[in-house]
Image: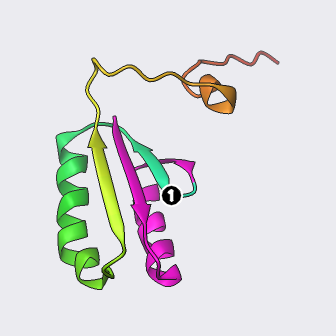
């Protein structure tokens, strides 16, 4: 899994970056996205940040990408605890 966290001060750029990340994964919190760990996704995201977004970032802006391996343990509480469970609805 990849976790992408960002703090971007410009509202327009932050909205654009958020919409961009929605193509790859799901929002966990306001400025945190969970993305399936794939070298293709990671390469696409880092290239696009370098080529499309980085030049528009301000000094105080930051983007963090955490590459989590299968050996990483994620403990979930609340609503997020149900994200990985399968549901079967029978009508």
Q: Along the horizontal axis of the image, is 10 left or right of 48?
A: right
Give the quarter of the figure containing the N terminus. Answer: top left
Q: Is residue 30 visible?
A: yes
Find the magenta span and give its range: 1-29
> Residue 88: image x %, image y %?
68, 16
Where is residue 84 shown, x and y percent of the image? Answer: 54, 23
- Image position of 71 with respect to 28: above or below: above
Residue 89 x, y percent position in the rendering: 74, 19
Which secondary structure lies at badge 1? Answer: loop
Task: Say which residue appears at 20% left-offset and 59% top-offset.
Answer: 46
Q: Residue 51 in the image: x percent, y percent?
A: 18, 75
Q: Residue at coordinates 28% horizontally, 20% vertically from top-left?
A: 70
Q: What residue is at 47 percent from the left and 78 percent from the top?
A: 9
To which residue does mark 1 refer? 31
Work out which residue is located at the far front of the displayed protein and give it. 60
- Whether residue 27 is situated above or below residue 84 in the rendered picture: below
At a point 56% along the width and 24% down the height, the residue shown is 76
Horizontal side, residue 89 vs residue 22: left or right:
right
Q: How dense is the environment of label 1, judged by Cα within 10 Å: few (below 14), some, or many (20 and up)?
A: some
Examine the image and state in which quarter residue 91 appears.
Answer: top right
Nearer the observer, 14 or 42: 14
């Amino acid at each position: 899994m990849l976790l992408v966290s960002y703090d971007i001060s410009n509202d327009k750029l932050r909205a654009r970056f958020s919409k961009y990340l929605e193509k790859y994964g799901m929002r966990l919190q306001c400025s945190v996205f969970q993305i399936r760990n794939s070298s293709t996704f990671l390469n696409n995201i880092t290239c696009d940040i370098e080529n499309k977004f980085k030049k528009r970032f301000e000094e105080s802006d930051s983007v963090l990408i955490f590459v989590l391996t299968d050996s990483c343990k994620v403990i979930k509480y609340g609503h997020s605890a149900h994200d990985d469970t399968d549901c079967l609805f029978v009508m």
